[in-house]
């Protein structure tokens, strides 16, 4: 049973010291009850109370980690059905399947693409997270050899080890050392062995159900045996079946606190079709609706990139705009004669503008003004990017000490601000830059300081 804020407050030291980052114990208790704050943020709470409150205020979808040290994939921790209610916590893991029946070149190709298909966008590195290693021949030696090959070849991959033979899984897990894999999967017939292996190794265990009811039964058995970290496969191998099961599981866990389904799901689009485009479409549906992991048959850039973007969008906190820090950024090694540009701190704007400047190879100073993550025109309309604010920022930024000229290039969309800004920034010349970032390289190549 979840605790209320008042129940949690009774267990707090009530110092109202604010060291947790919240001014009062009451406000802190309310945030813990709402799942917005961890009880461990209060340094004065005993371990016993932490355990009691932590258990009671745990998210309905359990947080489970795969990997070790700094190389960890975190799944679950979800508290809501819809992103706009709060936010989704941990992005769906995207993985690729390798099996002991594949040729060396097929495996090497997948490992190579796992390592190389990486894209940076708005300061976020988008990449695959997981390699699923399948014991397709029920053969310990080849399974361990393939596991070692993946461990050596994909240094930051988190592993899902797939076998119904607990002995083979144990041998492959031993090769993983600190990189704790997900052990997949526990069926109705091997659940006792898998529970023992999960407890012995401390690894999370994947439930491999034949259907939703079977999954619930295995989940209950494993938790009764003392396992806490589970991941669920309901056995669905059609898009409709997998989507329905994901919806039912999330709804039962979040709205009914139904424990047997209170875990992330692992899904296998790789086993649902032979058509790569259809596989991508199925994956996109499952990323949107609650899959903790999707396993693909292969990694290809034209399929991965849109999935990465979808994942980035869905798991971005809708209550918190993506921002970069207010600062003076030097691009291409600027000096005292280099142009000075200003824009807002919306991440997408920053990365597009800085990317164009870097591409131009023109040494430049880029000033980023804090507009609370709003884009140029929105910030201006909301009164967060006005002439007085820009002038105040320019004066405190220290840019005047870095350049010999006094010329500021403003976004073309703020052209109407030129006169007002020249009044606020006495001695500075205001130049209107292009409206579109794509026109910046040509603009900068022609730019010379105003006489
Ligand atoms: Fe209260 Fe602890 Fe926060 Fe201090 S740190 S205000 S005692 S909850």
Image (cartoon, grey):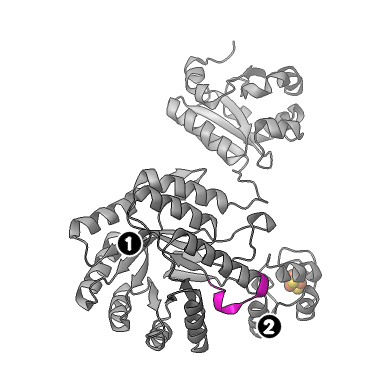
Q: Can you give x and y, in whole percent of width and height, for residue 55 in the image? A: 63, 79
User: What residue sits 41% from the left and 50% below the top?
Assistant: 280
The verdict on label 1 being within 8 Å of ligand 1 is no
Task: Report the span colored magenta.
Answer: 255-263
Q: Can you give x and y, in whole percent of width and height, for residue 367 in the image? A: 60, 33
Q: Judge the density around disc 1: few (<14), some (14-19), many (≥20) Cα neighbours within 10 Å.
A: many
Relative placement, left or right, of 84 versus 302 is right
Q: Secondary structure at mark 2?
A: helix
Foreground residue, 167 or 7? 167
Q: Secondary structure at mark 1?
A: strand
Residue 258: within the magenta? Answer: yes
When the figure is inspected, residue 202 is found, relative to residue 423, above or below; the finding is below
User: What residue sits 52% from the left and 88% below the top?
Assistant: 224
Find ligand 1 in the image and state its quadrant.
Answer: bottom right
Quadrant location of residue 184?
A: bottom left
Q: Judge the density around disc 2: few (<14), some (14-19), many (≥20) Cα neighbours within 10 Å.
A: some
Q: Can you give x and y, in whole percent of width and height, for residue 338 in the image? A: 52, 23
When the figure is inspected, residue 76 is found, relative to residue 422, above or below; the finding is below
Foreground residue, 278 or 36? 278
Give the mark, 2 or 1, whose residue is nearer the N terminus: 2
Circle 1 is placed at which residue position?
A: 97
Relative placement, left or right, of 50 versus 242 is right
When the figure is inspected, residue 227 is found, relative to residue 243, above or below; the finding is below
Tell me the mark number nearer the camera, choosing from 2 and 1: 1
């Amino acid at each position: 049973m979840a605790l209320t804020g008042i129940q949690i407050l009774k267990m707090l030291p009530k110092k109202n010291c604010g060291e947790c980052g919240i001014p009062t114990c009451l406000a802190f208790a309310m945030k813990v009850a709402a799942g917005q704050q961890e009880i461990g943020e209060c340094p004065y709470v005993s371990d016993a109370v932490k355990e009691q409150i932590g258990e009671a205020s745990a998210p309905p979808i359990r947080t489970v980690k795969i990997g070790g040290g700094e190389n960890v994939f975190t799944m679950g921790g979800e508290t809501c059905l819809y992103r706009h209610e709060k936010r989704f916590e941990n992005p769906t893991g995207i993985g690729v399947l390798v099996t002991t029946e594949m040729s060396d070149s097929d495996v090497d190709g997948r490992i190579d693409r796992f390592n190389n298909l990486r894209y940076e966008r708005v300061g976020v590195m988008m990449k695959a997270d997981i390699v699923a290693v399948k014991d397709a021949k029920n053969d310990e030696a080849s399974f361990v050899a393939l596991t070692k090959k993946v461990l050596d070849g994909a240094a930051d991959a988190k592993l899902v080890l797939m076998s119904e033979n607990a002995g083979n899984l144990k041998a492959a897990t031993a090769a993983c050392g600190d990189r704790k894999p997900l052990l997949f999967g526990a069926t109705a017939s091997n659940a006792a062995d898998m529970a023992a292996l999960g407890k012995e190794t401390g690894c999370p265990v994947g439930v491999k159900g034949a259907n939703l009811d079977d999954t619930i039964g295995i989940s209950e058995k494993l938790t009764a045996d003392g396992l806490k970290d589970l991941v669920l496969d309901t056995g669905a191998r059609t898009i409709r079946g997998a989507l329905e099961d994901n919806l039912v599981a999330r709804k039962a866990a979040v709205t009914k606190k139904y424990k047997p389904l209170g875990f992330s799901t692992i899904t296998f689009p790789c086993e649902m079709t032979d058509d790569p485009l259809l596989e991508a479409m199925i994956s996109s549906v499952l990323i949107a609706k609650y899959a903790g992991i999707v396993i693909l048959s292969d990694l290809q850039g034209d399929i991965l990139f849109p999935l990465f973007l979808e994942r980035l969008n869905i798991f971005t906190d809708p209550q918190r705009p993506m921002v970069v820090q207010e600062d003076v950024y030097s691009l291409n090694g600027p000096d005292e004669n280099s142009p000075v540009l200003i824009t807002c701190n919306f991440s997408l704007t920053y990365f597009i503008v800085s990317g164009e400047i870097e591409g131009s190879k023109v040494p430049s100073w880029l000033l980023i003004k804090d507009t609370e993550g709003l884009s140029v025109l929105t910030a201006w309309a909301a009164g967060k990017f006005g002439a007085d604010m820009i002038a105040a920022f320019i004066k405190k930024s220290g840019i005047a000490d870095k350049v010999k000229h006094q010329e500021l290039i403003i976004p073309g969309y703020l052209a109407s601000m030129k006169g007002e800004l020249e009044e606020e920034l006495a001695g500075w010349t205001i130049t209107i830059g292009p409206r579109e970032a794509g026109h910046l390289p040509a603009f900068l190549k022609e730019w010379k300081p105003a006489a």
